[in-house]
Image: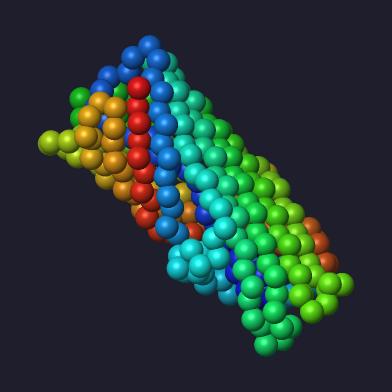
Amino acid sequence: MKKYVIGMAFLFGVNLAFGQEMTDRPPSDWEFTVAPYMFFGSVSGDSRLGTLESQEVDLKFKDVLKNLQFAFMLHGEVHKGNWGLMADYFYLKLGSDIDTPESGVLDIEFKQSIFELFGSYRIQKEWGWYDVYAGIRSWNLKLDLQLRDDASVGANGDQNWVDPVIGGRIYYKSPGDFILGMRADLGGFGLGSDFTYNLQPGVGYQFSDVFTLMLQYKYLYSDYSSGTEGTPNFFALDAATNGPLLGLVFRF
């Protein structure tokens, strides 16, 4: 069961916001950005499910790779002048056979999708620019757990929530083709999660007006709970996910 809680925490923590590419090209009438990316994250914190006691969360990226079945991550943006629309979609599926001394062999399957949609406004400067944005981050998490030696014993969970989010990004064009950037946002406010914040510094190298390679470090914290404490439907997670992101950014 502890493996089950750890897996749920990982799925909650992986975030799919990959910052827009950082270039100093002035805005045109219409600009489009497409950025496939990979997030190499780990998670730590505490989680609680149903009437169980709080469980420590500690999942390394190597554990994710070991149990990965399918993943898809894509970020996109469209801008007209200083106004923009940012969207991000992330899907992850993990499955594993885990030996536990308490219950024998478990068959576990995790599925999660996260969708972000933000409106943004850009302010241009000689040294670069900064954006302010606001919108939503929608979460869907599904888990199935089954004891292989007893089909009547199992557990499943389905969590869905939407966080309102506000934030900003700032980009500085250094000498040469290197770009430095920082993204930060916060949200939840008790409407989805109780509270969440994201910090995302990064560096990029602009090979051309079309192609940029980006490396960022992401730290995402979230405090979420649902249901009534002490009842079987209670779910709570207080965890932080952090790790590098690597993306290929195409702008046209």
Work out which quarter of the rendered image holds the C terminus and state it.
top left
Quick one: 105 or 88, which is closer to the camera? 105
Picture quadrant where residue 127 is located: top left
Residue 197 visible somewhere in the drawing: no
| Residue 50 percent coordinates (x, y) | 77, 68
Residue 182 occupies quadrant: top left
Q: Position of residue 191 (x, y in %)?
A: 67, 44
Position in image of residue 150 (x %, y %): 83, 77
Residue sticking out furthest to the top: 29
Say left or right for 38 vs 159: left
Question: Measured along the vertical axis of the image, is residue 217 above or below residue 106?
Answer: above
Q: Is residue 124 visible?
A: yes
Which residue reaches farthest right? 152
Q: Residue at x 70, y 60 (%)?
A: 143
Residue in view at x 73 percent, y 67 percent: 145
User: In this rendering, would 187 be left or right of 28?
Assistant: right
Q: Residue at x 67, y 48 (%)?
A: 140
Q: Is residue 174 left or right of residue 184?
A: left
Image x and y of residue 155, in percent:
78, 67
Foreground of the two, 147 or 160: 147
